[in-house]
Image (cartoon, rainbow, N blue to C red):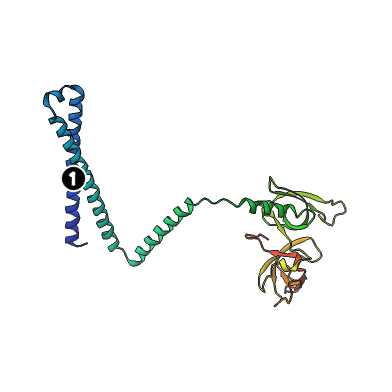
Amino acid sequence: MSTAEISVLFEKSKELDQLRKDLEDDLIEINKLHKKLQSTPDIIEKSGDAILQKLRSLYAHAKELSENEISASTILMAQLDALLQSGLSVAQRKKIEVSEQKKKRMKTDSDIPRFPNASSIRNQLEYWAGLKGEQVAARVTPDDAEKDEWFVVKVIHFDKDAKEFEVLDEDPGDDEESIPRKYKLPLSRIIPFPRKNDPSGAPDFPTGKHVLAVYPGTTALYKATVVNPHRKRKADDYLLEFDDDEEDGSLPQRNVPFYRVVALPDGHRQ
């Protein structure tokens, strides 16, 4: 910071301070006249227009001082900002600019109301309700469970108001006493399978992609990796390597129908 810059700031600060003092003096005089007029209303008749003229003059001067104070404050703030910026590195200035831009974007975003399209919501609800009788992938374990357990279940009912599925696990285990078990699950724990008779609507997972798939011969889904180099048709099976499926030191590659393979949910625990 140079001596000249300090001198300019000092002079502008003195100017601002003097303006505030002058304005304060005017306000004191105005208040005195108001009190005098309230206590002795007949003073106007005795002094004629002199006291009113003085009051008008004080008001005009106070207004001028207020405008000058605003102007001086604005100039001083600009000088201080420029001085502070000049002392920052390019990286620091850039960081401040980016931060300010983000704040502006956040404010703009918060000013824009976001309401889901009513028609879109109705269509989604109709889609979920249309899964009645279909098999889907369902996570039957709670959110705080150590591991996520996914099974093939059948949709019995979808409650549009609660946005909740009632599903049936038709094959709960190998135990002879095992009976089909019902669950009530939120949307977040249901993944529809691709339709067997409509391969065109199924996702096409590339080689190396992690997926969630039904392990052959079971109704359980596990994390797996796509290993087949290229499927010629969407209706072709996937060749997968399932995690924790090691045999003789290697992972066997297993064929799984496309309609039993879905995207791996974010944060999957196995």
- Residue 105 image-quadrant placement: bottom left
Q: Which residue is mark 1?
A: 19
Left or right for 47, reference 160: left
Q: Position of residue 175 (x, y in %)?
A: 85, 55
Q: Residue furthest right?
A: 176
Q: Nearer the viewer, residue 134 or 185?
A: 134
Image spot of residue 176 (x, y percent): 88, 54
The amino acid type found where label 1 is placed reads: Leu
x then y, percent, for residue 174 = 84, 57
Where's the N terminus, which quadrant? bottom left
Residue toward you, 158 or 255: 158
Residue at image position (75%, 58%) is: 136
Left or right relative to 5: residue 184:
right
Q: Secondary structure at mark 1?
A: helix
Nearest the eye: 48 or 267: 48
Figure quadrant of residue 45: top left
Locate residue 226: give its quadrant: bottom right
Q: Residue at x 19, y 52 (%)?
A: 12
